[in-house]
Image (cartoon, rainbow, N blue to C red):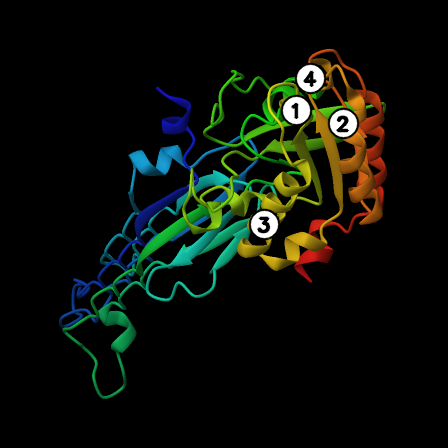
Amino acid sequence: MKPSDSFIDEVLVSVSAGDGGDGCVSLRREKYVPRGGPDGGDGGRGGNVELVADRNLGTLLDHRMRSEIQAEPGDAGGGSNRTGADGATAVVRVPVGTLVYDLADPSRPLADLASDGARFVVARGGRGGRGNAFFRTPTRQTPDSAERGRAGQIRRLRLSLKLLADVGLVGFPNAGKSTLLRRISAARPRVAAYPFTTLVPALGVVEVGERRFVAADIPGLIEGASEGAGLGDRFLRHIERTRVLVHLVDAGSLAFEPRDLVSDYDAIRRELAAYEEALLLRPEIVVLTKLDLLADRAALEPFAAELTRRGREVLRVSAATGEGIDDLLRAIVRALDKAPGADERAA
């Protein structure tokens, strides 16, 4: 299975809560008691459909394979005032960071399952019908009818995953994002010497002393991505939850052709702004990559001077040799210490 087949970040599913059980019509049979009186019990409630965020999941692939989810119906009531059993809840596990939309009103999410163990009942089971014992009155001693169970709620949903990461690695394809992630974490994204090697986001846990943070390699950003160029804006939403952006600029490309690195940097910033203007306010560290390929590093000074003038911190690294990696990790930790948390951004 290809990585792009196994990483699924958006699916459509149908959920059906269980119907309530029917109430029972029953009359006691006792000697010397004419018709015995009503003793039909109520039906059981239908099961709910409940979504639960699970940190051990990283994709919505399971729900592409199982697009219809149904809870159990409630059992019918019985004689002797026996209440039917409630239907079991259908518990559906989804990755942390899943947004839930009702296709009947997709303008805002029903739920944002942003923490491990977060739960949301997305479809409620139908109420059980009342048995004929419920309807006995002084003037109606032997009712001969009962209620049918109510239908369970049915919904058509869109589940959309936004990865939860502290740091987002952004930049043009082949800027060195995957190589950097391999260097600083145990993640092993694919690396090759051509653009669009990475077709899906990759996460890695980074340890700096006693600190730990999660970094995400966000693929597919090129000029025009927000309008559908390249891989389009499919993965841009995964940047939204990151607290700090690390913007990689391919300095090594200068060894092979003249390039305007400032223009490259500005192009990516325009795509971020086109997707969501607030991303430009996110703390950002600018990193010149692939220093090992560049013999004349003086060529980097105009770019560094321009970005410093704009108030950006500019670092230089080589993920291949490890040069500058420690300085970069320390800078990321400092930025995380100052950056607002996810809850503060949401507010």
Task: Determine which quarter of the picture holds residue 105.
Answer: bottom left
Q: Which residue is mark 4?
A: 183
Pointers 4 and 3 in contact (C-beta within 8 Å)? no
Which residue is under mark 1?
254
Real-space CA distance between mark 1 and mark 2, rounded to the nearest whole angstrom: 8 Å
Q: Amino acid at mark 4?
A: Arg
Quarter of the image holding residue 296?
top right
Amino acid at pointer 3? Leu
The amino acid type found where label 2 is placed reads Ala
Q: Residue furthest top?
A: 321
Q: Which residue is mark 3?
A: 272
Please give the residue where the numbered disc 2 appears in the rendered image: 299
Q: Which of the marked residues, 3 or 1, is nearer the chain's N terminus?
A: 1
Residue 317 in the figure: left or right of residue 99: right
Q: Earlier in the sequence, mark 4 or mark 2?
A: 4
- Is the residue 19 above or below the residue 147 in the image? above
